[in-house]
Image (cartoon, rainbow, N blue to C red):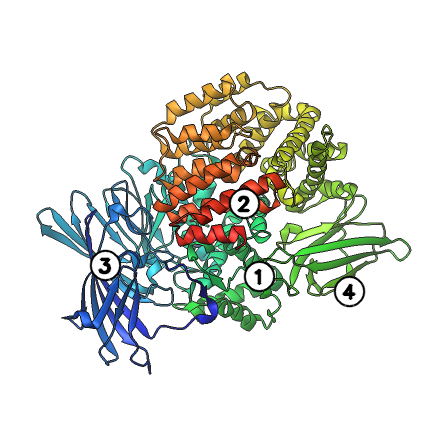
């Protein structure tokens, strides 16, 4: 926590190994005593260097070396480190370290803390050092035995990693339990939970016939809301066996839901700890999106058991080794479980909304960075989402069979290791003989590549000639860029809309339907195409790149109609819409009224009306790019009010032309019968909500929405229509009544109230800042709970372009004040919320200057955590 820079090139293995760790916790909210007995081993030939263990805000109590109390001349202890000198010269020795910690005062929610009276831990990335002095780095793998002692009444339940081996009574109302984890693991995967929780149980039998007990722990009374998570867990376990041949390796798998958690969830060995938002669900309180998130996150953390736990990271620079790969695995799981194209569209939307702006702004960094000053700030969209896309490209380049061979080799070769990206890539090279050196640039170079494309059809020669040029815009610290290997899926369509499958391609290496872009420039020739064809590039989004192709609107409309890849059909529509939205934004700024091109409207409405498409796709098709997407595409001199007005104007026109179609969709599209969160039903609801949203622009007044909300039998429709009502008619009697009724009904369910907070925080326009301030004063807000903070302040800063980007900078100043307050309590959450300002440099000059002043105010504040200091400085460009 020193705030100095850590560099990959400085990596050195430790001089000492820790073979076993025996922990004893004597739990007390204010004064927990932790005894850690380490069996140490000096590596071959290591000189008599002192041993330096990491700590963070620790109170040192005692040190024993080989069982004897160490005199103060043999060590130096501070809250952040323990240096032991004059060690025994033997190969093996033991250390016994006693520390004291105060879980109830731990507001950072890293290390051992209390959440609603439950003791729990979060150790990734560097939280274990807040529990005891340790070599707190992922390449130190040890076998852990954990003994927990606590008053029975406070903590009837005592959990840690691995298998339970002993438990009993200690007298005077205390009891204990012992857990043993036979798998060597890094300290960041350690976990402990103690408290009074209810449990939901189930069983699973692995493919090789081993029984596993499944347990999900939740607050008493919430058991029924864990059923979906349990179902998702069983499906994840089965899928990982079938798709990747990976079995679970302990006799029990536990998940604990807690209400105070910095992140979404954590993959601790055998004892995952979750933000309760990603466990608890029922029709009355959870939306379709909540269900999909629960399924994906349960899967993600479970999948880490192989990609992260059995094979972990050598150092934190390799974070994408576990996170990128595991995101790829959870994406594939959701694609197999739900609808592949719908999932792909959602992934690309998310990637473009979060990763693309990161990659083009001051926080840009490679998927595998070379330096960090605060590792918490590198759990980014680039490491996660781009990291997953890189794995996906590898699968595209190698093909299914070879990709599997490489991955299988990785699982066998590196089981039990702390590995690197080089190790990972070597497995694919060794298994297939393919040279991945150029491909590896994806891990090392920041920035979103651009492909500039031009094409012409040679009528007499019956050839389509396509010029493709690659480039990567400069990013902080990286002016010159290397050439990349970009796998680009393509398709060709004839004027009748039929796909041309017989193709002769020259001028480029290609396999199947993938072009391998490797040079700066390629002149690709498609031969023997009888009529001028329409080219579809980057099908299924085979590479995370920006394509600049001046394709005519007619060609895009052609693809929007005839593309057989549903993802690309959506992409073409979305490109078409984006052009129109950018044009409309320009018109708005010039004081003109927004007119919308007829062919866009026709393309949208044709897709909307195409009953051969699944409803979810039709819903996606008519959901225009968001305001942040438009701003990203425009790139500079952004006026968020103009973007909002333009988008709203385009939607008005679509609604006017499409009123009949939208009315036809109406309620008839909704699934019948009892609520089910399955993808098909969810898709119908999504389409219904999209239609309602358009209809409020032509027909539906606020009074008509209120009854829909009141009679909804599920949270998706209820909160969806509430959002439409409140955003479209802010301050109207209908909107305020609906908000009040919702609050009354759900006032005792914080996770539902989070939706109520977010909906209000994202009301467009200049009055929302005041509303946010007012909501902060209500009983529903608490600066102490990360979910509340994210729902209100996070949504306002990251999800409300017009409300947050006020020309006078008032909301920036508000955020600066909140970040400074929050930083003193929970730096990790503060730093993350501050990333909402990462694109400030693309604002128009007046707002840009206001944003700079607010950022500088944060940067100049003292004291500041390393987390917020790092984000503030890099965002400012210092
Ligand atoms: N290992 C992370 C949790 C984590 C993140 C710990 C940051 C420490 C710092 C976990 O596997 C994870 O990635 N969780 C995600 C959700 C996931 C589905 C992408 C999260 O918490 O947001
Ligand atoms: Zn993860």
Residue named by callout 1 = 477
Q: Which picture quadrant has residue 636?
A: top right
Q: Nearer the viewer, mark 2 or mark 4?
A: 2
Q: Which one is earlier in the sequence, the residue at label 4 or at label 1? A: 1
Mark 4 secondary-structure assignment: loop
Mark 3 secondary-structure assignment: strand
Neighbours of disc 1 within 10 Å: few (<14), some (14-19), many (20+): few
Residue named by callout 3 = 146
Residue at the outermost left position: 172
Q: Is residue 783 above or below residue 4?
A: above
Work out how far the residue at label 1 is from the one at label 2, CA to CA, in angstroms: 21 Å
Q: Position of residue 759 (x, y in %)?
A: 48, 31
Q: Nearer the viewer, mark 1 or mark 2?
A: 2
Q: Position of residue 126 (x, y in %)?
A: 36, 58
* Camera-nearest residue between 876 and 509: 876
Residue named by callout 4 = 507
Neighbours of disc 4 within 10 Å: few (<14), some (14-19), many (20+): few
Q: Is residue 789 above or below residue 209?
A: above
């Amino acid at each position: 926590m020193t705030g100095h820079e850590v560099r990959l090139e400085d990596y050195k293995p430790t001089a000492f190994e820790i073979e076993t760790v025996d922990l004893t916790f004597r739990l007390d909210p204010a004064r927990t005593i932790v005894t850690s007995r380490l069996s140490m081993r000096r590596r071959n030939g290591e000189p008599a260097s002192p041993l330096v263990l990491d700590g963070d805000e620790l109170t040192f109590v005692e040190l024993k070396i080989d069982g004897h109390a160490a005199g103060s001349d043999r060590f130096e202890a501070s809250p952040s480190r323990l240096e032991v000198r004059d060690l025994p010269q033997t190969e093996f020795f033991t250390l016994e370290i006693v520390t004291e910690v105060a879980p109830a005062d731990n507001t950072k929610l890293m290390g051992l803390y209390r959440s609603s009276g439950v003791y729990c831990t979060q150790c990734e990335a560097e939280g274990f050092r807040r529990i005891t002095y340790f070599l707190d780095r992922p390449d130190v793998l040890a076998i852990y035995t954990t003994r927990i002692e606590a008053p029975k009444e406070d903590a009837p339940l005592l959990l840690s990693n691995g298998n339970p081996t002993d438990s009993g009574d200690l007298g005077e109302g205390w009891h204990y339990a012992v857990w043993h984890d036979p798998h060597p693991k890094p300290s960041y995967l350690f976990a402990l939970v103690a408290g009074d929780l209810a449990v939901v149980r189930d069983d699973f039998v692995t493919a090789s016939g081993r029984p596993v007990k499944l347990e999900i722990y939740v607050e008493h009374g919430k058991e029924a809301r864990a059923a979906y998570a349990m179902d998702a867990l069983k499906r994840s376990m089965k899928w990982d066996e079938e798709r990747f041949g990976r079995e679970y390796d302990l006799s029990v798998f536990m998940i604990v839901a807690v209400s105070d958690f910095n992140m979404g969830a954590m993959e601790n060995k055998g004892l995952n700890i979750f933000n309760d938002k990603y466990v608890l669900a029922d029709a009355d309180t959870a939306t379709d999106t909540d269900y999909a998130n629960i399924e994906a996150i349960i899967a993600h953390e479970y999948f880490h058991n192989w990609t992260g736990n059995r094979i972990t990271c050598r150092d934190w620079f390799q974070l994408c080794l576990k996170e990128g790969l595991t995101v790829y695995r959870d994406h594939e799981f959701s694609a197999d479980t739900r609808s592949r194209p719908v999932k792909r569209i959602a992934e690309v939307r998310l990637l473009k909304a979060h990763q693309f702006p990161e990659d083009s702004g001051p926080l840009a960094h490679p998927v595998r960075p070379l330096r960090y000053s605060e590792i918490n700030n590198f759990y980014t969209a680039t490491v996660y989402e781009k990291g997953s896309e890189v794995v996906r490209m590898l699968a595209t380049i190698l093909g299914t069979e070879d990709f599997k061979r490489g991955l299988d080799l990785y699982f066998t070769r590196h089981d039990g290791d702390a590995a690197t990206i080089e190790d990972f890539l070597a497995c694919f090279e060794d298994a297939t003989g393919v040279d991945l050196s150029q491909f590896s640039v994806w891990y090392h170079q920041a920035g979103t590549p651009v492909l500039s494309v031009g094409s012409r059809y040679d009528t007499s020669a019956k050839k389509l000639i396509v010029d493709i040029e690659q480039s990567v815009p400069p990013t902080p610290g990286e002016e010159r860029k290397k050439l990349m290997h970009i796998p680009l899926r393509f398709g060709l369509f004839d004027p009748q809309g039929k796909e041309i499958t017989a193709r002769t391609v020259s001028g480029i290496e290609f396999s199947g339907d993938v072009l391998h872009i490797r040079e700066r420039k390629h002149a690709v020739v498609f031969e023997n195409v009888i009529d001028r064809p329409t080219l579809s590039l980057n099908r299924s989004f085979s590479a995370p790149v920006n394509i600049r192709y001046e394709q005519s609107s007619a060609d895009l409309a052609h693809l929007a109609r005839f593309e057989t890849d549903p993802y690309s059909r959506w992409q073409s529509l979305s490109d078409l819409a984006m052009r129109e939205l950018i044009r409309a934004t320009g018109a708005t700024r010039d004081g003109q009224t927004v007119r919308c091109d007829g062919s866009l409207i026709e393309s949208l409405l044709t897709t909307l009306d195409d009953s051969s498409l699944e409803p979810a796709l039709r819903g996606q098709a008519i959901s225009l790019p968001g305001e942040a997407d438009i701003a990203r595409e425009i790139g500079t001199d952004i006026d968020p009010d103009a973007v909002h007005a333009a988008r709203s104007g385009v939607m008005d026109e679509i609604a006017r032309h499409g009123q009949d179609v939208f009315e036809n969709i109406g309620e008839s599209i909704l699934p019948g019968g009892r609520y089910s969160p399955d993808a098909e039903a969810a898709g119908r609801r999504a389409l219904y909500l999209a239609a309602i949203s358009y209809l409020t622009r032509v027909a539906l007044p606020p009074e008509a929405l209120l009854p829909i909300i009141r009679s909804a039998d599920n949270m998706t429709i209820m909160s969806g229509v509430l959002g439409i009502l409140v955003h479209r008619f802010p301050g109207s009697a209908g909107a305020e009544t609906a908000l009040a009724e919702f609050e009354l009904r759900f006032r005792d369910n914080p996770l539902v109230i989070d939706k109520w907070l977010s909906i209000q925080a994202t009301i467009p326009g200049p009055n929302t800042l005041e509303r946010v301030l007012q909501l902060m004063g209500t009983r529903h807000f608490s600066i102490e709970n990360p979910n509340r903070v994210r729902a209100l302040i996070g949504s306002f800063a990251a999800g409300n372009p017009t409300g947050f980007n006020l020309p006078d900078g008032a909301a920036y100043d508000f955020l600066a004040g909140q970040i400074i307050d929050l930083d003193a309590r929970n730096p990790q959450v503060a730093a993350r919320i501050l990333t909402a300002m990462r694109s400030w440099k693309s604002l128009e000059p007046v707002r840009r200057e206001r944003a700079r002043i607010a950022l500088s105010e944060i940067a100049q504040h003292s004291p500041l955590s390393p987390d917020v200091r790092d984000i503030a400085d890099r965002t400012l460009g210092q």
